Image (spheres, rainbow, N blue to C red):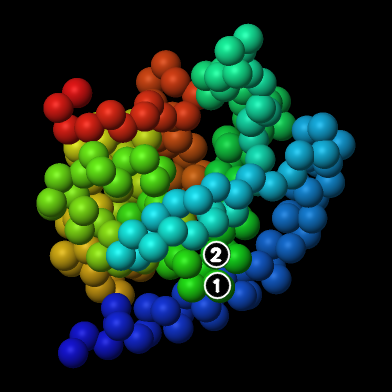
Amino acid sequence: MNLYPRVLKSLIDIIVSFFLLILLSPVIIFLVILLFIFNSKQIFFIQKRPGKNEKIFGLIKFKTMNDRRDEFGNLFPDSERLTKVGKFIRKFSLDELLQFINVLKGDMSLIGPRPLLIEYLPLYNDRQKKRHNVKPGITGWAQVNGRNAISWQKKFELDVWYVENISFVVDIKIFWLTIKKIILRDGINQKGEATVNYFKGNNT
């Protein structure tokens, strides 16, 4: 039995997340105040996402977009709803900090495939569904190999590769590459987009 993915990985998740939340608490408090003042008191964004074995949980993030809608009640595109404060927060991936709470709760891991939207679940093929065989992560193999700048199909290939090759060495490599990506702000957006296009299935 491989002890790392079955036991040690979760233990490391809890220990590291606990200390990072303490270490980053001044930054988190600053962001709470910043959003309270400049984002119409809208601070947190909680959205239902599928986790391990497609179990649904509430993903916690800092709110970086407003809720502007058109005359028909439809939300405006992400690029039009991203606030000035939100742009700053996303520039340095600070909107992800609250997900350490998700890790402590056991919903997520520090490293794993990113938790995506519930409506994507019926769109995956059998191989892509393997990304839900492990806990989703704050960062992952796809994030350090292109993040939002690569196609959905490539992203899912990288997610499944991680699931099939999970190890302590791979996680350490992803951890350090994530720090590098954050510093360089590489691959945060798709070209010409504020965030990333929606996944519409494998035949689109």
Helix, strand or loop at disc 1? Answer: helix
Q: Amino acid at mark 2?
A: Asn
Disc ID at residue 105: 1
**Which class describes the residues within 10 Å of circle 2: few (<14), some (14-19), or many (20+)?**
many
Could you tell me which residue is drawn at 24 percent across and 69 percent down? 166
Q: Nearer the viewer, residue 153 or 191?
A: 153
Q: Residue at x 33, y 59 (%)?
A: 54
Q: In the orientation shown, which residue stands out farthest toward the front?
A: 72
- Say which quarter of the image contains residue 12: bottom left
The kind of residue tagged 1 is: Lys
| Residue nearer the viewer, 98 or 202 | 202
User: Whole-percent x and y of residue 94?
Assistant: 61, 47
Query: From the viewer's perspective, is 176 left or right of 28?
Result: left
Q: Position of residue 132 (x, y in %)?
A: 28, 60
**Above/below status of 191 relative to 101:** above
Q: Is residue 171 above or below residue 59?
A: below
Q: Identify the residue position indicated by label 2 in the image.
A: 102
Tag shown at residue 94:
none
**Cα distance between the residues tagged 1 and 2:** 5 Å
Q: Residue at x 56, y 73 (%)?
A: 104
| Rendered position, 34 above or below 56 | above
**Which quadrant of the figure contains the N terminus?**
bottom left
Say few, some or many: other residues with alpha carbon within 10 Å of mark 1 (under 14 / 14 to 19 / 20 or more): few
When asked about the image quadrant of residue 11, the answer is bottom left
Quarter containing the C terminus: top left
Farthest right residue? 37
Q: Is residue 58 left or right of residue 65?
A: left
Determine contact: label 1, label 2, CB under 8 Å: yes
Give the residue at x 21% y 44%: 124
